[in-house]
Amino acid sequence: MAAAAATLRHLALGARLAPHSSGARARLQRLQQRRGLRLSAPAAIQVTVRDALNQALDEELERDERVFLLGEEVAQYDGAYKISRGLWKKYGDKRVIDTPISEMGFTGIAVGAAMAGLRPVCEFMTFNFSMQAIDQVINSAAKTCYMSAGSIPVPIVFRGPNGASAGVAAQHSQCFAAWYGHCPGLKVVSPWSSEDAKGLLKASIRDDNPVVVLESELLYGVPFEMSEQAQSKEFVIPIGKAKIEKQGTHVTLVAHSRPVGHCLEAAAVLSKEGVECEVINLRTIRPMDMETVEASVAKTNHLVTVEGGWPQFGVGAEICARIMEGPAFNYLDAPAVRVTGADVPMPYAKILEDNSIPQVKDIVFAVKKTLNI
């Protein structure tokens, strides 16, 4: 018994050290061989989207002294959503900067700093407030590199929560994916999982172009598995590359941000009825990875797009148009179907809000409609 207990203590110690030390892993493997034991590989750790974003900011602030964060309440208060928790204490007033409640003012400061060679991360408390600064984002940040014939790059990140939250009504619930995705000169990313959030934010900060990072407030507290690779300080996700979250053969579901989770839930429901959905997480709105979408449509012959934004001129409308204009159109066996938010300003009442946002049942209905079942 004593020997068995000692073995378990050694294994537990090795398991605690394994993520941090290759030497500890080697010792653990030798111990396992001597004892004749076999252990399964350690599971990926659970990390919330909030903590993944915090890790990305921390690692990039540490990596490059030109990077700094500014916005309302990002410093002493640790951020309105605690994304910047601990960063002000670690990096000080010059790297994590509280601003007045003036989006046009501090966004202009950030854009000017980017033109001067720094790499600012400009946080909007919600992207609804970015409307106060849209001249700085579009006319100054997005167009300057082109208008200067490439001589003045603007390496800046605009980030914050986007789209519907819960009970915050029309002025705080809008999705800006289509707005910013419309504008040449910008890159636009929209993460879903913790790995998406960390990898895309780090890639955005390192990019020499202005990048809009559209996060979801409702995902901040949601834990996702994060692989050992994603825990590396050098982990980045290439901007402009989608990810197939689930393989399928009958219909392609394309979404970004929180609706990716809804699509996976709908796919699980439909799988019980014999329908296998392929779920694509766009990750990037601009430039859009149409190659992945087209290849999937060529395989499944059916397409459903899902988004939280309004239907007119939306992300789904763009995907459907590109499919119609490209080679994948010839593979469609039925018209593409869009699932979107309702074409109204977001209501405050919960039951009306729920009916204004795509739900799992709406995706299931759309899939059955396009498959004619």
Image: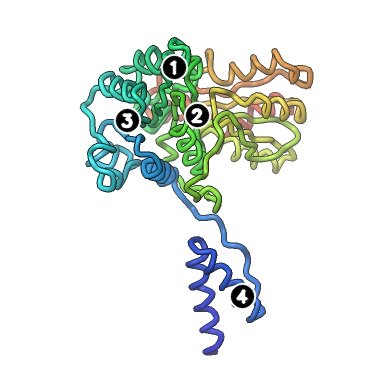
* Marks 1, 3: nearer the viewer: 1
The answer to whether marks 3 and 2 mark residues whose Cβ atoms lie closer than 8 Å is no
Kindly identify the residue that appears in the image at 51 percent across and 47 percent down: 224
Q: Marks 1 and 3, Cα distance to the nearest angstrom?
A: 31 Å
**Front-most of residues 31 and 47:** 31
Residue beneath disc 1: 151
Give residue 264's position: percent from left, percent from top: 60, 39
Is disc 3 placed on a helix, strand or loop? loop
Residue 125: % across, % down? 32, 30
Looking at the rendered image, the quarter that the C terminus falls into is top right
Q: What is the CA distance from the residue labelled 3 to the residue labelled 2?
A: 17 Å
| In-image side of 224 versus 366 (left or right) | left
Element under disc 4: helix
155 sits left or right of 372 in the view: left
205 lies above or below 172: below
- Whole-number angstrom distance, CA of label 2 to CA of label 4: 44 Å
